[in-house]
Image (cartoon, rainbow, N blue to C red):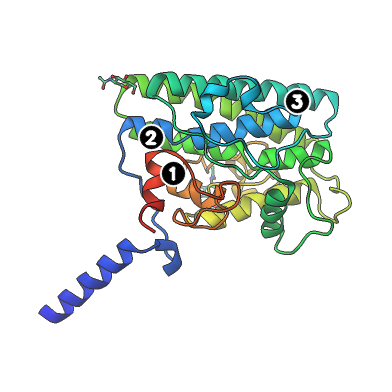
Amino acid sequence: MATLYFFSTLVLTIVVSVPINVLGSAYCGPVEAIDKDLVQFPLNLEFLEAEFFLNGALGLGLDAFEPGFAAGGPPPIGAQKANLDPVTRRIIEEFGYQEVGHLRAIITTVGGVPRPLYDLSPEAFAQLFDKAVGYKLDPPFNPYSNTVNYLLASYAIPYVGLVGYVGTIPHLANYTSRRLVASLLGVESGQDAVIRTLLYEKADEKVLPYDITVAEFTNAISGIRNELAMCGIRDEGLIVPLNLGAENRTESNILSADTNSLSYARTPQQILRIIYGTGSEYMPGGFLPRGGSGKIARSFLDKV
Ligand SMILES: *[C@@H]1O[C@H](CO)[C@@H](O)[C@H](O)[C@H]1NC(C)=O
Ligand SMILES: *[C@@H]1O[C@H](CO)[C@@H](O)[C@H](O)[C@H]1NC(C)=O
């Protein structure tokens, strides 16, 4: 009995101290962290959104507007000006400026972190989209080549920030940080709603030259995010089975939400599994080839 107890303790210790996902079961509980670290963590997504939107609309990155915010971190790889219609360009430009404001709000409240290295190249998006549909798209998916592609690529980003904010708020101890994150959440969810609405207008259209509709792409992206994060359904595409629609009464799913139409929540670990594209918070890759910044993201990398 004593031997068995010792042995199972040993196994438990090993399970806890190696990359958990490698063993096929993921940790879905909260991260232990103080407010400052919880509020700095989303900088990883806010920098990404700022760079993607500003570059997509204007061909300029964060450094053209607020060079100090990067705190010495490198500019992103591969971000480009996208070929957008005038209305979409206007919307994305505004979103880009909003992200600059979000960065300022976080940095002035809790301090900044160095901007991590991002890979926003067409190849990085193509990899995610290949993974989402389950085969190599031919030609490779290019987020910058037209409006619908750019919107699909955008579908992949603010939503992750939004569910992260929903997940963070209940764990914040202090009024100042709760107020800040609630206000960030409001605008992130607005951005997500706009992107999803623009895509819903084209839900049944094929994304040329592929034989895949806009709605099918959103379902595939949401599917791969659920798969990478490994903690159940917290992400739904634009057209869903009735049992995932609002009140089980509609297959339209312009907003992604749970059975009572409440926002889903994600933990920092789940978010890292998604934006690394590796399904592991211990294995950088995807949009963050060297991993995220700040205490929470680094804590997983320092263990490897
Ligand atoms: C609350 O958090 C803010 C931002 O991190 C900090 O400046 C402030 O001192 C904190 N207040 C308390 C009472 O901990
Ligand atoms: C919708 O269906 C799910 C099961 O798929 C069930 O748990 C939920 O209670 C239903 N909601 C309503 C409002 O009937």
Secondary structure of residue under mark 1:
helix
Crowd around label 1: few <14 · some 14–19 · many ≥20 (10 Å): many
Residue 176 location (% of width, % of height):
35, 19
In whole angstroms, how far apart are the C-alphas of marks 1 and 2?
Answer: 8 Å
- In the visual, does 241 lie left or right of 289? right
- In the visual, does 258 lie left or right of 196? left
Is 58 rendered above or below residue 288? above
Say whether marks 3 and 1 touch (CB < 8 Å): no
Viewer-nearest residue: 104 or 39: 104
At label 1, the amino acid type is: Pro
Judging by the rendered image, the residue that carries numbered circle 1 is 268
Is 2 rendered above or below residue 248? below
Viewer-nearest residue: 266 or 69: 69
Which mark is drawn over residue 38? 2
Instruction: Identify the residue at horizontal 85%, vertical 56% (top origin).
Output: 211
Q: How many marks?
A: 3
Crowd around label 2: few <14 · some 14–19 · many ≥20 (10 Å): many
Secondary structure of residue under mark 3:
helix
